[in-house]
Amino acid sequence: MKAIRQHEFGPAEVLRHEEAPDPVPGEGQVLVEVAAAGVHLLDTVIRSGESGGPFPLPQLPTTPGREVAGTVATTGPGVDPSWVGRPVVAHLGMASGGYAALAVAAATSLHEIPDTLTPEQAVATIGTGRTAVGILDAAEIEAGDVVLVPAAAGGLGSLFIQAARGAGAVAVGLAGGPEKVERVRALGADVAVDYREPGWPERVLAALEGRKPTVLLDGVGGEVGRAGLDMLDVGGRIVMFGWTSGTVTPFTSADIAAGSLSVVWVTGPRMMKRYGGLRGLETRALAEAAAGRLVPVVHPPFPLADAAAAHRALVGRETTGKVVLAP
């Protein structure tokens, strides 16, 4: 089969499109013919050789990729053979072979793809969608809220805009560049602003006509996160889940005391230990997507051979929505 192989840690160019042996499913596993493989920002961090959070770096050589959608080709021992031929989506775990024409997945990780979703939408939902559902649970958005979403054109941000609108809240989307701003507006954002332009906080507040954000869904951090925090109304809340800017949003206990703010950190151990686990979030995310309430935005797929280009585009903020590879 064709696969992306990584023999060393480093820049995107270390991802090589090569022939590799077909994987064989073991006890409790299935072999998936991959139609779409998800690309995550964490994939780029692992590829570079930086820590993957609480998880150790993979042994090399390796085939990256944690999310796949496709069709079950064969089953291993102990797996119901009726899975063969069914469209499925699965989260494989850390750096577990998704960037390939064929991938092995645990049968217990499989979800059948709803008829209303494409493989690309399904693979976006199984990872990004489950994270979004967990973050939205913590945010507890209500109709009276004004929700500020940095990186609103991204995989998570586009779902947050939909969720805020669905809850009857005011959705404020921040994006980088005119094209992304228009995409955010098309998603239904009440206010869409280019955060790369000077004075964007003032434009947001002017558009809100006297109201202030009450919820900040912060996965960007840095100066953008701090500016968003400074805009929050008294009693507002910041839900933190990452720092794509490179630094966490800076704040002190004085900020919390002065503004009566609440701060919640969502991802990591908190999400891993939640009742129902990650599989429960996956099931809910797929149901929401199938019903049309949280439909993932998918960037035009990259061919599998162009995995390095997909990594560069993702890191360079050149993409909109979920990035996928199409073997």
Image (spheres, helix red, strand yellow):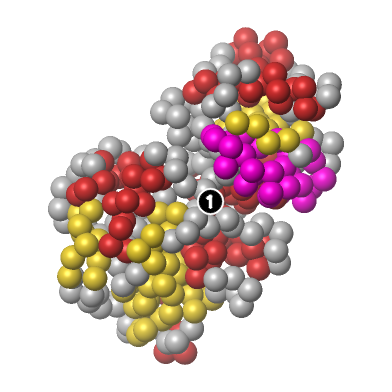
Q: Residue at x 72, y 42 (%)?
A: 189
Whether residue 181 appears in magenta in the rendering, the answer is yes
5 relative to 137, above or below? below
148 relative to 267, above or below? above
Q: Quadrant of the C terminus?
A: bottom left
Q: Residue at x 70, y 10 (%)?
A: 258
Could you tell me which secondary element the residue under label 1 belongs to?
Answer: loop
Looking at this rendering, what residue extends furthest in the bottom direction?
82
Q: Residue at x 45, y 70 (%)?
A: 69
**Residue 170 placed where, x, y %?**
78, 38
Q: Residue at x 62, y 10 (%)?
A: 254
Tell which of 238 and 182 is nearer to you. 182
Using residue 262 as the reference point, say whether residue 105 is left or right of it.
left
Residue 198, by quadrant, is: top right
Residue 157, by quadrant, is: top right
**Residue 227 placed where, x, y %?**
60, 20
Whether residue 176 appears in magenta in the rendering, the answer is yes
Does the rendering let one see residue 99?
A: yes
107 relative to 148, above or below? below
Specify the segment rendered in magenta: 163-189
**Residue 155 placed where, x, y %?**
54, 49
On the image, numbered disc 1 is attached to which residue? 321
Under mark 1, the amino acid is: Gly
152 relative to 258, above or below? below
Does the rendering let one see residue 38?
A: no
For the residue carrying disc 1, how many other residues have a C-alpha within 10 Å: few (<14), some (14-19), or many (20+)? many
Looking at this rendering, what residue extends furthest in the front direction?
178
Using residue 132 as the reference point, say whether residue 105 is left or right of it.
left
